[in-house]
Image (cartoon, rainbow, N blue to C red):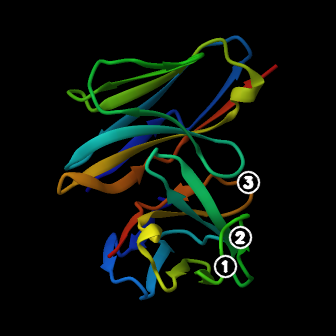
């Protein structure tokens, strides 16, 4: 149980285009989903926290107009990287949680390459 | 199907105890195994292991990988209450020679009592 999937698993796009990444909780309802970015030294940076039906809370330094997050249902959150640039190339990982007392379950990540 | 299994799922110990957390994996294209500590926000990176039998150490924490038996352990000696956290194991896959997807285990929740 508690499986989280991401789609696509990898995407290559041209600079200036927008890319949407989906995060789904497959067998549970996630009241909260988190979006992370993995950096080359393996650290994970929390980008934003989203609760179903409300606006995402962005971490300091993360541009909310560039990284649009939507959490429209209890099983789906999307991250849209708008006007992507090569420096946005990274691994984007989501996690989902049922309740505040629950652990986070991580997705497999989406590798974004912007040419 | 690629999978990473951590055990135990939760553990309660007293300060000063030594704990061993387990992570086993079955993946098609192994690149590296990573350990993270998650307290509040983002998981904190602890270790990356790519070679079998070489212990990595950082203070009271150490970890080792066995690529033949497909598992890793994370040891914490002389535990402190500040070690209370969820410890995540993740396997990064190889994709065409570069980094592929990360497969996370469900984590081990460690509680250290004073």
Q: Residue at x 36, y 38 (%)?
A: B33
Q: Quadrant of residue A99?
A: bottom right
Q: Are marks 2 and 1 on the same chain?
A: yes
Q: CA distance from mark 3 to mark 2?
A: 21 Å
Q: Is residue B17 above or below residue B112?
A: above
B87 vs B68, left or right, is right
Pinpoint residue B22: horizontal percent, then vertical percent: 44, 29
Badge 1, how many Cα within 10 Å: few under 14, some, many 20+? some
Callouts 3 and 2 on one subunit? yes
**Nearer to us in this view, A42 or B55:** A42
Q: Give the residue displayed 62% in from the left and 59% down from the top.
A: A46
On what subunit does the disc labeled 1 rest? A
Gap between marks 2 and 1, in whole Å? Answer: 7 Å
- Same chain for the residues at labels 1 and 3, yes or no? yes
Badge 2 is on which residue?
A58
B90, above or below B51, in the image: below
- Judging depth in this view, the residue of A76 and A22 nearest the camera is A22
């Amino acid at each position: 149980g508690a499986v989280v999937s991401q789609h696509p698993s990898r995407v290559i796009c041209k600079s200036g285009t927008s890319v949407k990444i989906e995060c789904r909780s497959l067998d549970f309802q996630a009241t909260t989903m988190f979006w992370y970015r993995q950096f080359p030294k393996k650290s994970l940076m929390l980008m934003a926290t989203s609760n179903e039906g409300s606006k995402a809370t962005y971490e300091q330094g993360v541009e909310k107009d560039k990284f649009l997050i939507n959490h429209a249902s209890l099983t789906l959150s999307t991250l849209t990287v708008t006007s992507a640039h090569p420096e946005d190339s990274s691994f984007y990982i989501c996690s989902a949680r049922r309740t505040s007392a629950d652990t986070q379950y991580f997705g497999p990540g989406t590798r974004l390459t912007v040419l | 199907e690629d999978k990473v299994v951590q055990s135990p799922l939760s553990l309660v110990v007293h300060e000063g105890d030594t704990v061993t957390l387990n992570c086993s994996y079955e993946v098609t294209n192994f690149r590296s195994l990573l350990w993270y500590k998650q307290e509040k926000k983002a998981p904190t990176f602890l270790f990356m292991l790519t070679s079998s039998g070489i212990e990595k150490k950082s203070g009271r924490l150490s970890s080792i990988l066995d690529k033949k038996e497909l598992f890793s352990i994370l040891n914490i000696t002389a535990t402190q209450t500040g070690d209370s956290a969820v410890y995540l194991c993740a396997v990064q896959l190889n994709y065409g020679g570069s980094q592929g997807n990360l497969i996370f285990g469900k984590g081990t929740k460690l509680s250290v009592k004073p």
